[in-house]
Amino acid sequence: MTEEQKSALRERILDRQVEVSMRIADLEEATKPIAPDKGLGRLTRLEAMQDKSVNEAALARLREEQTQLHNALANLLRPDFGTCLGCGGEIAFERLEVLPGSTLCAECAG
């Protein structure tokens, strides 16, 4: 992987980290407990609880992505960054652009 590609990937990771952090903040607000004294009807309360459950799952996925982005940014400085842990070949730059935390090439991940 060239230094130019690493630089472009670093910028992409940093941009995505900002997006993920903002979305996490929104979801943390959306997953706060629903007060029992809040004036909701029975169906509305059930819908709110269901929405909360969906938002909690999305929040968990985003926190995992945040960890992967942090690790990818740290690993970007390593000389073996972009090397597949499965076969030892090079991970395609296009794959790393989409999934910067990838440690496997598309073939090994498949």
Image (tube, rainbow, N blue to C red):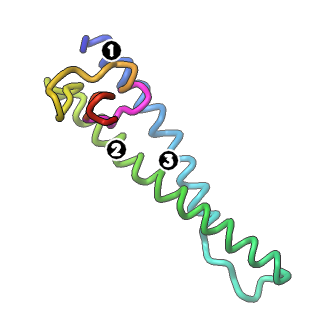
Measuring from the top left, give residue 3's x and y in whole percent.
26, 13
Q: With respect to residue 27, does 33 lie above or below?
A: below
Measuring from the top left, give residue 33's x and y in whole percent.
62, 77
Name the quarter where the N terminus is drawn.
top left
Q: Secondary structure at mark 2?
A: helix
Name the quarter where the C terminus is drawn.
top left
Query: Which amino acid, mark 1?
Result: Gln
Few, some or many residues within 10 Å of mark 3 (<14, 14–19, 20+): some
Query: Which amino acid, mark 3?
Result: Ser
Q: Are marks 2 and 1 in contact (CB under 8 Å)?
A: no
In the picture of the structure, the residue carrying the numbered disc 2 is: 68
- Residue 41 falls left or right of residue 16: right
Mark 3 and mark 2 lie on one chain; the one further toward the N terminus is 3
In the picture of the structure, the residue carrying the numbered disc 3 is: 21
In the picture of the structure, the residue carrying the numbered disc 1 is: 5
Q: Secondary structure at mark 3?
A: helix
Q: Secondary structure at mark 1?
A: helix
- Residue 28 falls left or right of residue 70: right
Foreground: disc 1 or disc 3 = 1
Measuring from the top left, give residue 24's x and y in whole percent.
53, 53
Query: Which amino acid, mark 2?
Result: Gln
Nearest to the observer: residue 49 or residue 8: 49
Q: Is residue 2 magenta?
A: no
Q: With respect to residue 66, does 37 lie above or below?
A: below
Mark 2 and mark 1 lie on one chain; the one further toward the N terminus is 1
Mark 1 and mark 3 lie on one chain; the one further toward the N terminus is 1
Magenta segment, which residues? Answer: 96-103
